[in-house]
Amino acid sequence: MGRIKNEQVKKYLGLFKHGFRNPDAKDVEDKDAFYSFKREVRNPGNEAYRKLSDAMHEIQTDSDTVYNQVVNCLELLDERTEDEPDGVDIDDLRDDMIEGIDSSVSVYTTDLTKWLARTTWNVYYLGEALQEFGPPKDNDGFKLLALAQYACHSEIWHAVFEILEEEAEEEE
């Protein structure tokens, strides 16, 4: 099994920039933060950009969710691999990834309903959650919504992890 190295993670993390749609707003939430690819990396000759962009376009949810979760995943992997010059075993990182996905899911009902309302594609993840986890024992719709967001985030994180895993195995 391969090992994911920090320079690998940083290569992908370096593709992104952070910005605000409303930078002059007084309230932080009103600034409307977002991530996007840096302009200078957006070209088909950039292999890292092409791989990640292709994977991101296959995910059926709103682009803000995709970008945020890709960056969240890469930041967690960056932190985890930072002090490991030989990299970290892929199997060891899987547990960290599951914890990262868990912590990325909102615990607030208003955030979950906002996420659901961003795109009709998010309704798909309700079905995915029911299929994968079954209905919540107490038939709590908000727990189902949290499971749907988990399924969505999980798909995104696994897409990022798959790219890094394939590269690590190629380097062996």
Image: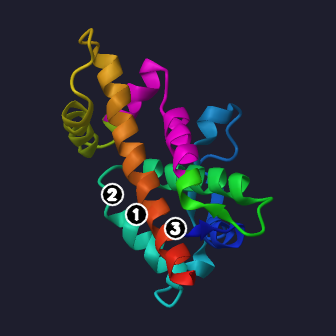
| Mark closer to the chain start, 1 or 3 | 3
**Residue annotated with mark 1:** 56
In which quadrant of the rendered view does residue 17 lie? Answer: bottom right
Callout 2 crowding tier (Cα within 10 Å): few <14, some 14–19, many ≥20: some
Quarter placement of the C terminus: bottom right
Q: Residue at x 70, y 66 (%)?
A: 6
The residue at the far bottom in this view is 45
In which quadrant of the rendered view does residue 130 lie? Answer: top left
Q: Which residues are magenta?
A: 94-116
Callout 1 crowding tier (Cα within 10 Å): few <14, some 14–19, many ≥20: some
**Residue annotated with mark 2:** 59
User: How far is disc 2 from disc 1 in space, using C-alphas?
Assistant: 6 Å
Eye-nearest disc, 1 or 3: 3
**Residue annotated with mark 3:** 1
Identify whether 168 is placed above or below 150. Answer: below
All told, the count of numbered labels is 3
Secondary element at tag 3:
loop
Eye-nearest disc, 3 or 2: 3
State yes or no: discs 2 and 1 in contact (Cβ < 8 Å). Answer: yes
Q: Residue at x 64, y 66 (%)?
A: 9
Task: Name the one closer to the observer, 72 or 77.
Answer: 77
User: How far is disc 1 from disc 3 in space, using C-alphas?
Assistant: 25 Å
Q: Which mark is residue 87?
A: none
Q: What's the amino acid at mark 3?
A: Met
The residue at the far top in this view is 138
